[in-house]
Amino acid sequence: MTAPTDQQVIDAVDRIAPRAIALLQALVRTPSLTGDEGAVQQLVAAAMTEIGLDVDVWDPSAEELAPYSEHVGAFDTLAGRPNVVGRWGGSGGGTSLILNGHIDTVEPGVRDQWVVDPFSAEILDGRVFGRGSLDMKSGVVSNIIAVAALREIGWQPKGDLIVESVISEEDGGAGALASILRGYTADACIITEPTAFSIVVAQGGSLVFRIHVPGKSAHGAARNEGISAFELFIPIFQALLDFEAERNRTIDHPLYAEIENKIPINVGVIRSGAWPSSVPDWLIAEGRAGLVPGETLEQFKAEFIEVVMNAASRDPWLAEHPPRVEWFSGQFAPSEISAGHELVDAVSAAHRAVTGDTPSIKGVTYGADMRHFINIAGIPCVMYGADDVSGAHAPNESVAIADMLTCAKAVAIAARDWCS
Ligand SMILES: [Zn+2]
């Protein structure tokens, strides 16, 4: 058969829009905090089965992921936390495509800060509210609806079209990596994270650090006899701020030129001392440092440690009792593909067909599953999706229904072109 026109694809998505909205509401009403994705994945599997995909539901193996613990974190078990993949087999002779989304979400946070119940999926002003509505259950729905629309108009892909709903993105990406290890690879991948319809071709990396600063305790009434670990940390903290500023001045990646802080170093946790009237003899500072594509984790770690040690060496106590730097939790290597890649052209043309606008091409500072596809599987990957990531992880998270449908239409058109 001849491929459906852009308009036929757009009309098909519009016809099934009510199903898309109902599915998104059902997914938002089923909480799926990272670690507890089982119930919602049953709904996703049912939706994929209903549209006729070959559906694979499996709990990733902690053992299989263990060699990758530096990338995705370590797990005792992932039992009860299934990945769901729906496959539409191609008729042959075409290139294949993965449409990926993660189903896990972060905590809803403080209830009082929400205008609606965070799991109500209430619709206000054309937006579905709730934790995960934007990041990124709407993206998962866009992918399913895109495929449903293509199936309804009777199109047949030549290359395989694979739809993925993966777990554990928010804490390192074990689900995406597990899908790769299970053999789900393709010639390209689109992740429908909320990018405000920019095409994201580069994503920053991140490392999580812990700095131990030793002090010397004394009674608070004679505090000059002690050495406060907290006071010792202040010049180290200043050195980190200077390091961040220096990196922002010198990093010249073109896709990051417009970003005010390209490589944020955030100290998120400080613990120190045990008693109000004792001089604190220890401090632990934990934080997250960003990297841009082209930088390696190892080189950055060495530079970071040098900054901490240099700052410490200027203090006589720390020179003899140096601080210690540890790296823990997931390590997110940066990743990118060329802005001129044919996948970028395909998504750009599809977005233009739906909206008339040419999407911008961007780099972002956050890490996401894109790096597993590019760095581990060698699959060219972009992120493209509805609405703005600034609403994610925040109270009153919401997604515009119209944007979710635009995303579904563009993804369907891109898939039609890519898999033909
Ligand atoms: Zn996300």
Image (spheres, rainbow, N blue to C red):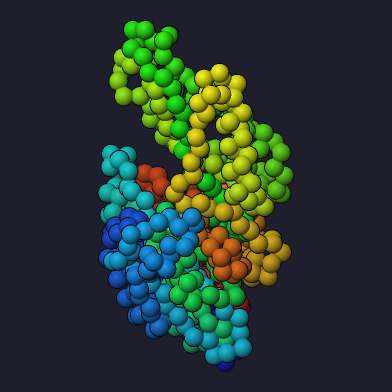
Residue 407, position in %: x, y? 51, 65
Residue 111, position in %: x, y? 28, 42
Q: Nearer the viewer, residue 382 or 178?
A: 178
Who's the residue at 42% across and 77% down the image? 86
| Residue 84 image-quadrant placement | bottom left
Determine whether 344 is above or below 1 in the image. Answer: above
Q: Is residue 6 visible?
A: no
Which residue appears farthest toward the front when viewing the image? 320
Does 205 sit left or right of 283 as displayed? right
Q: Count numbered badges in the picture.
A: 0
Who's the residue at 40% across and 83% down the image? 54
Who's the residue at 69% across and 67% down the image? 341
Residue 250, position in %: x, y? 71, 38
Determine whether 324 is above or below 121 in the image. Answer: above
Residue 5, position in %: x, y? 59, 80
Q: The C terminus lies in which quarter of the figure?
A: bottom right
Q: Nearer the viewer, residue 412 or 212?
A: 212
